[in-house]
Image (cartoon, rainbow, N blue to C red):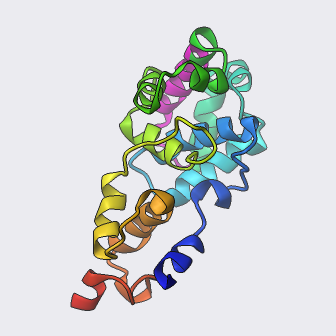
């Protein structure tokens, strides 16, 4: 189907960051990035900030804890998180500490979860992880973690309806990206899905 082929061409944010989610280390990196993307801030700033964390080697729980609050604030400020620097630095440190103390690591957290909803509950038990961050993280782990089966987000549902798409889950990352980068910015004229979208045809 032409629509599905086009959707598969839209890269996920994790892939754009150069992450291979089949690797446990990259799964934690995506978890960190998901916390950044979950803030009310542009995806460009989130990507830039994650790359700064990577450049500083701050991509494991131990590295975050060793760096300390002041260093994390410095990196967040450099990336553009000026409004959220203090709270995000605190959340990252508490997340890393809670993950290590309660579960050991992300892989063990997934093993401990009884089912997909319990996995979401355990993730949201960590500081700084709300429903949005958990969805961002888990939707790209479908097919990798057996229990990663979040319900499609509101952003994906909105675009899925406009495209008359029946199966949302395989394309959720692409649908969310379309919503954020085209729908919300009213960029229908340059959207790669405009030929399939009901709103673009109306406008």
| Residue 89 placement: quadrant | top right
Q: Nearer the viewer, residue 44 or 183?
A: 183
Indicate the position of residue 183 as horizontal and vertical percent values.
Answer: 34, 72
- Quarter holding the C terminus is bottom left
Q: Is residue 12 left or right of residue 104?
A: left
Assign the magenta stretch its main secondary structure: helix
- Residue at x-position 69% and y-position 46%: 21
- Residue 28 shown in magenta: no
Q: Is residue 196 visible?
A: yes
Per the rendered image, the range of residues in magenta is: 80-98
Q: Nearer the viewer, residue 53 or 24?
A: 24
Q: Is residue 171 above or below residue 94?
A: below
| Residue 57 placement: quadrant | top right
- Residue 86 shown in magenta: yes
> How many numbered marks are there?
0
Q: Is residue 158 left or right of residue 133?
A: left
Q: Is residue 203 visible?
A: no
Name the outermost residue toward the top: 101
- Residue at x-position 63% and y-position 26%: 106
Indicate the position of residue 56 as horizontal and vertical percent values.
Answer: 76, 39
- Residue at x-position 64% and y-position 44%: 144
Q: Is residue 187 above or below residue 36?
A: below
| Residue 96 placement: quadrant | top right
Q: Is residue 54 above or below residue 114?
A: below
């Amino acid at each position: 189907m032409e629509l599905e082929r086009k959707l598969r061409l839209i890269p996920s944010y994790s892939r754009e960051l150069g992450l291979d989610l089949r690797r446990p280390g990259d799964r934690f990196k995506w978890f960190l990035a998901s916390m950044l993307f979950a803030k009310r801030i542009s995806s460009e700033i989130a990507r830039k900030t994650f790359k700064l964390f990577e450049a500083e080697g701050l991509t494991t729980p131990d590295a975050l804890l060793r760096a300390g609050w002041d260093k994390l604030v410095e990196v967040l400020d450099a990336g553009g998180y000026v409004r959220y620097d203090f709270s995000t630095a605190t959340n990252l440190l508490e997340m890393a500490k809670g993950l290590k103390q309660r579960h050991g690591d992300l892989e063990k957290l997934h093993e401990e979860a009884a089912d997909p909803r319990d996995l979401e509950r355990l993730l949201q038990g960590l500081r700084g992880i709300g429903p949005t961050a958990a969805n961002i993280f888990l939707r790209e782990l479908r097919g990798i973690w057996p229990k990663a089966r979040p319900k499609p987000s509101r952003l994906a549902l909105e675009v899925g309806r406009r495209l008359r798409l029946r199966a949302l889950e395989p394309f959720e990352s692409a649908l969310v990206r379309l919503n954020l980068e085209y729908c919300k910015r009213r960029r229908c004229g340059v959207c790669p899905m405009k030929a399939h979208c009901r709103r673009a045809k109306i406008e």
